[in-house]
Image (cartoon, helix red, strand yellow):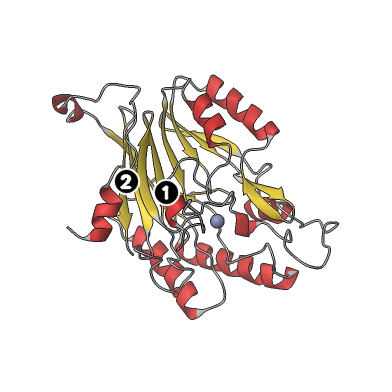
């Protein structure tokens, strides 16, 4: 067995499953409702490799026999706006929009990534600029807020904003307003299956695999920017809702599939691989296809386009 395949398939955390497993005979009856493509961490920049790569990924989706109903963009659409000048940020968004317009034919749902946020790490002070911070991404997507939800074929999608400012850097968590909104969303949608989308994983093993080395004392090196620091609080909230079936993320550029307390958490690699420098660790540039079923199950296929 290929090492990569093994790592992709392994279910790394096995915990108590809230619902009984569906017997084999019944699983044959489950019907596929729809497919969605998940593209994340495109990190577009002016370069032939990056531009061709983004084009190829979208062209690959266009060529699928069974077209997805829509695409979820998991965030980090552009290489970086955190520390980039206004001009450089504009160039990257122009490029992203140009390629999307030329190659994408499907409805697109966006999730905000850390690198989509402008100016948090710029030396010059741009705080008074109307495009500062998340404002540029809101203008770019046309959304009113950085988190939102939508329903598709009895599945309810909740798209979160994982990225909060933290002393000039960022930390992975939901702010209080967003957490309160999430509680209300879950309470109002108990009759639907739920798919949560966040740029940074809420629960993931590959977040711990991101760093090459360990801490000097042997502890894992796992930064606050790589895994939701409020994961335990979110996990406790999720336990009240057995209709939450899956959580999809990007950010790490690695892939895993973690089954934790009855929810399937998928971290979905990166369209850009190692930021357009080939594979990142064991994972080639890829996007994910998710099949959503009538019984609340989901299946993922990674596509190395
Ligand atoms: Zn990211």
Question: Which label is found at residue 249?
Answer: none
Instruction: Name the residue carrying label 1.
Output: 267
Viewer-proximal residue among 301 and 6 = 6
For the point 56% across and 72% down, the residue is 45
| Crowd tier of the residue under label 2, counting other residues whose Cα lies within 10 Å: few below 14, some 14–19, many 20 or above | some
Query: Disc 1 and disc 2: Cα gap in Å?
Result: 11 Å
Q: Residue furthest bottom?
A: 48
Q: Quadrant of the N terminus?
A: bottom left
Q: Residue furthest front?
A: 217
Q: Is residue 253 visible?
A: yes
How far across and down, in percent of the image, does residue 272 sit?
45, 66
For the point 35% across and 65% down, the residue is 284
Q: Is residue 106 visible?
A: no
For the point 32% across and 43% down, the residue is 12
Q: Which of the two discs, 1 and 2, labels the residue nearer the N terminus?
A: 1
Instruction: Name the residue carrying label 2.
Output: 300
Left or right of residue 42: residue 163:
right
Is 127 located above or below residue 153 in the figure? below
| Crowd tier of the residue under label 1, counting other residues whose Cα lies within 10 Å: few below 14, some 14–19, many 20 or above | many
Residue 292: quarter of image: top left
Viewer-proximal residue among 196 and 149 = 196
Viewer-proximal residue among 13 and 202 = 13
CB under 8 Å between callouts 1 and 2? no
């Amino acid at each position: 067995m290929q090492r990569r395949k093994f790592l992709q398939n392994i279910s790394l955390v096995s915990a108590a499953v809230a619902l009984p497993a569906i017997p084999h005979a019944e699983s044959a009856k489950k019907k596929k409702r729809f497919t969605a493509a998940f593209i994340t961490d495109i990190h577009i920049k002016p370069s032939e490799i990056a531009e061709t790569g983004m084009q190829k990924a979208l062209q690959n989706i266009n060529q699928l026999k069974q077209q997805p109903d829509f695409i979820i963009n998991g965030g980090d659409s552009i290489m970086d706006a955190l520390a980039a000048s206004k001009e450089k940020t504009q160039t990257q968004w122009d490029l992203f929009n140009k390629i999307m317009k030329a190659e994408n034919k499907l409805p697109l749902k966006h999730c905000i990534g850390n690198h989509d946020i402008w100016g948090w790490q710029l030396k010059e002070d741009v705080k008074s600029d109307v495009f500062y911070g998340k404002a540029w991404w809101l203008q770019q997507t046309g959304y009113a807020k950085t988190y939102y939800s939508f329903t598709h074929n009895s599945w309810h999608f909740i798209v979160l904003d994982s990225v909060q400012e933290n002393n000039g850097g960022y930390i992975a968590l939901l702010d209080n307003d967003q957490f309160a909104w999430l509680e209300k969303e879950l309470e109002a949608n108990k009759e639907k299956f739920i798919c949560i989308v966040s740029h940074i994983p809420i629960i993931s093993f590959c977040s711990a695999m991101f760093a090459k080395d360990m801490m000097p004392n042997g502890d894992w090196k796992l930064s606050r920017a790589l895994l939701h620091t409020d994961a335990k609080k979110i996990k406790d909230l999720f336990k009240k809702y057995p209709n939450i079936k899956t959580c999809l993320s990007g950010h790490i550029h690695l892939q895993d599939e973690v089954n934790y307390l009855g929810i399937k958490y998928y971290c979905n690699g990166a369209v850009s691989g190692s930021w357009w420098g080939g594979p990142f660790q064991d994972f080639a540039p890829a996007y994910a296809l998710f099949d959503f079923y009538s019984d609340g199950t989901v299946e993922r296929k990674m596509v190395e386009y």
